[in-house]
């Protein structure tokens, strides 16, 4: 059984999902991950859950929660593009109905910006 109509009705935003496809070397000789988009225009419900400051590292961490269909291929360490910004996936949990069927995936992600 797939996600019910009530949940699908709130999936009004879209995201792209990227997976690491290896590593390369940048202009300064540093190793950097190479990303490729594996799923695009994935319907989602997304909201900010927390905004933390880390003054010792001069960072602001924006934490978001996204809800996607259970068939979406997304894992920890993937990257999500939402509203033109990149977010690191911290965790993915498959949520099931009472009868054990897959209902949706809950994706927690974050984005670091400088203060």
Image (cartoon, helix red, strand yellow):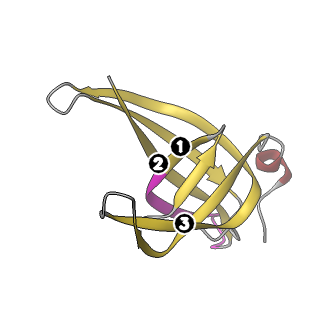
Q: Is 22 inside the magenta-drawn segment?
A: no
10 Å crowding of disc 1: few (<14), some (14-19), many (20+): some
Q: Is residue 94 left or right of residue 109?
A: right
Q: Is residue 12 left or right of residue 48?
A: right
The prevailing secondary structure element of the residues shown in magenta is strand
- Distance, label 2 to label 3, CA atoms, is 17 Å
Circle on res. 35: 3
Q: Is residue 103 left or right of residue 112?
A: right
Would you say the residues marked 2 and 1 are in contact, meaning their CB atoms lie under 8 Å apart? Answer: yes
Disc with the residue nearer the chain's start (3 vs 1): 3
**Residue bearing the label numbered 2:** 109
Element under label 2?
Answer: strand
> Where is 47 relative to 2, above or below?
above
Residue 84 at x, y = what percent?
64, 39
Residue that appears at 43% across and 41% down = 111
- Distance, label 2 to label 1, CA atoms, is 6 Å
> Where is 103 relative to 41, above or below?
below
Residue that appears at 39% across and 27% down = 51
Residue 36 in sight: yes
Residues 51 and 97: in front is 51
**Residue bearing the label numbered 1:** 65
Residue that appears at 52% across and 32% down = 48
Highlighted range, magenta: 88-100
Element under label 3?
Answer: strand
| Quarter occupied by the N terminus | bottom right
> Where is 77 relative to 45, above or below?
below
Quarter assignment of residue 11:
top right
Quarter assignment of residue 61:
top left
Q: Is residue 24 left or right of residue 1?
A: left
């Amino acid at each position: 059984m797939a996600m019910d109509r009530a949940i699908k009705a709130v999936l009004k935003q879209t995201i792209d999902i990227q997976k690491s496809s290896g590593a390369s070397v940048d202009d300064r000789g540093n190793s950097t991950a190479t990303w490729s988009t594996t799923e695009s225009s994935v319907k989602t419900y997304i909201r900010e859950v927390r905004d933390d400051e880390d003054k010792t590292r001069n960072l602001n961490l924006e934490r978001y929660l996204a809800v996607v269909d259970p068939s979406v291929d997304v894992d920890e360490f993937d990257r999500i593009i939402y509203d033109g910004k990149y977010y690191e996936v911290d965790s993915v949990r498959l949520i099931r109905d009472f009868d054990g069927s897959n209902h949706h995936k809950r994706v927690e992600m974050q984005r670091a910006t400088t203060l």
